[in-house]
Image (cartoon, coloured by chain):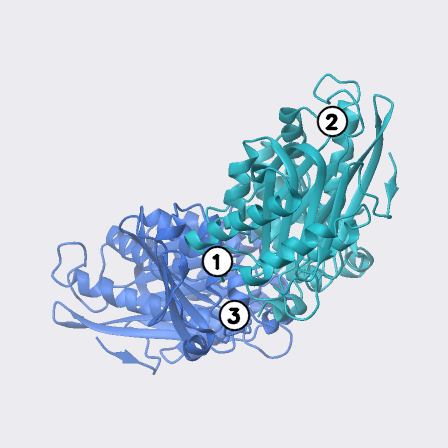
Chain colours: A blue, B cyan
Amino acid sequence: MSRQNKLVLPMGYKAAGMHAGIKKGEKKDLALLVSETPASIAGVFTTNQVKAASVKLCRERLAGGKATAIVINSGNANACTGEAGIRDARQMGHVTAEALGVDEATVFVCSTGHIGRPLPMDVIEPGIRKVAQSVSQDGGLDAADAIMTTDTHSKHHTAELKVDGKAVRVLGLAKGAGMIEPNMATMLSFIMTDAAVAPDALQACLSAAVNDSFNRITVDGDRSTNDTVLMMANGEAGNEPLKKGHPDWEAFCQAVNEVTLALAMRIVADGEGVTTCVTVRVKGAVSDEDADLAARAVANSLLVKTSWAGKYANWGRVMDCLGYSRAKVQEDLVDIDYDELPAVRGGMSAGTSQEQFREVTGRAQYAIVVDLHLGSGEALVYSCDCTEEYVRLNM
Amino acid sequence: MSRQNKLVLPMGYKAAGMHAGIKKGEKKDLALLVSETPASIAGVFTTNQVKAASVKLCRERLAGGKATAIVINSGNANACTGEAGIRDARQMGHVTAEALGVDEATVFVCSTGHIGRPLPMDVIEPGIRKVAQSVSQDGGLDAADAIMTTDTHSKHHTAELKVDGKAVRVLGLAKGAGMIEPNMATMLSFIMTDAAVAPDALQACLSAAVNDSFNRITVDGDRSTNDTVLMMANGEAGNEPLKKGHPDWEAFCQAVNEVTLALAMRIVADGEGVTTCVTVRVKGAVSDEDADLAARAVANSLLVKTSWAGKYANWGRVMDCLGYSRAKVQEDLVDIDYDELPAVRGGMSAGTSQEQFREVTGRAQYAIVVDLHLGSGEALVYSCDCTEEYVRLNM
């Protein structure tokens, strides 16, 4: 398995991205990903009860199991837009299907941007017709650009492996949870592979990968109305369909994991105003669920996140979060480390001075490891600091 | 019932506050509240599993039902300090009891300040002996000053009423959740009344009042290791002991509510960097519990709080929070108002422009009212904005 920075699409895919006029200025705001043959499709969506129109449509179409295209607009979330929003999302799919000459039921639609405003269909419809004419094997970077909202750079990651001795590529694109304009709040990721994958196996592989990557990052604890991860597998590599039991199944899942984790880490690092990424690892909890509760309490605490920005090993605030998390905690058993330095032993100061911590807390990335010493439950959350810049960007 | 700004202690109480040397400089850091006769005592404490030594000691002594004194230090939380911390808290009580000539079991101890550092008993012990000699009926303001950490001003509120035709006074002191120095994170409040109140009734009255006031405020969603509310009732007013059924019981509870709510509102307004206080009211939930979940999701959202700082009516972020709260929400039924202006109707924009919202969102205090239209559950949370100043102060 190797990493590549060059954006080569897997076999049988084309892509394009352009400025249709949803965003002001000349920023790209419309992307199209096309599989030349119907691909198996899997998806993971926001658990928010308030869902964007595009999320509702994607969930509905996922049942069909096949995808030929994903059309994505940025600059407008098409969320909280009622029946008209649903009609607009369907119309995006309809125009895309017509322009590509594919079955409308195999076209997926995603949106990201402002909540509560009608989609400007007068620019989106001609935009789709235009972008559909410009899809090519070289269009991946344009597509990656066009799905961005407030990301400072586009995000993609490729993994390569052999399946049945045939070269397989897994390419992921993502946009982050950067939210500098009011109402922006979405993570989108699209994964394309030329491997053949059995439909149920594809969903299982994607769900597991998302759970260990995108579901483990937090910038501000706010879950969006539009979060969507879609994965297409078109089988152009010519391998036997992958599923559990196939000799290359584990390697394939690992490749997908590599892609989603790499993208997830880039999303955290590109959160607004972020200067420090901190991995919060909790072990020794009575269960994995408890470990998760404890890790998220720490990773989402405003006081902890501001202390990270201040490059201060404020373990008292970490103890405080553990205590109010819904995880079982016994104060005098708690150990906490900041990378290689002990901060807390048995619920009390380990005696490490702030001077000693300074080098660790100044790192661009470090880990806080909590051992609750109550069991074998473990969890991991990737978080980042909260700086004045974050507040300024989100005011 | 009337409000007074002058700090007259209820009958039979004395107080003092001074600089003992826990804090640097000359700021007061040691307070003593004394009831000349043993008072009934009630208490409400942090639900955090990590509890300061003083909280553990107060909970233990509450069982005795009587208080003669509360000694409070600021500048050091005596939390995460292990067995030595418990010994120090006991010693604070012991020295106070000796100096006042009272039963040690009736002395309550509170601490607020840095987590994880040993109490400087070398300055606290002589400090207690000194402050015990200076208690007087005029010492209330000094005590209010001495419990502050990063509050910008001391907080007190008095309610007066007649019980059995006799004048009764309810005085509350509080310090806030302002946390500008690392590790600071505590709310303390002390309520003194000269009314006679049956012990069980006192606890019921206090618990109800705390639930509708201190438990409904949020500055950053972080619950501290030290939060404590103690109430003393010494009966010097000479009334028949108050309890349910007494003709003045409701009026007394209302007076206590008035005091705790006034103090709670001042704590929010004095949160670090706060420019705007926002009351989040949720109604129409399937239950009061659901309404509470929804209100707290909105009131604690970093994205919502930064939008308040930006004076922007970002109702899309409010919809997002409602959706991911664990409360039942049906998107197309949701209505949201900002004071008198409709923001959302049926889950969609009510058509009010940001220009129209500007006057409301610029107010020092306004309300966001959410109607979920699913039932009759209601809840109220008092919150505040998150500004760059908050981050700077907590780094």
Front disc: 3 or 1:
3
Q: Residue at x 75, y 28 (%)?
A: B235
Which amino acid type is shown beneath numbered disc 3?
Answer: Leu
Report the side of B31 relative to B90 (left or right).
right
Report the side of B299 relative to B252 (left or right).
left
Q: Are there few (<14), some (14-19), or many (20+) residues within 10 Å of tag 2?
A: many
Whole-angstrom CA distance, mark 3 to mark 2, is 72 Å
> Can you give x and y, in whole percent of width and height, for residue B198 in the image?
67, 24
How many numbered circles does the render carry?
3
The residue wearing badge 2 is B196
The residue wearing badge 1 is A93
Is residue A24 visible in the rendered image? The answer is: yes
Secondary structure beneath dot 3 equals: strand
Front disc: 3 or 2:
2
Can you say whether A213 is above or below B352 in the image? below
Q: Are there few (<14), some (14-19), or many (20+) residues within 10 Å of tag 3?
A: many
Point out the residue furthest to the bottom here: A6
The residue wearing badge 3 is A30
Q: Residue at x 76, y 20 (%)?
A: B240
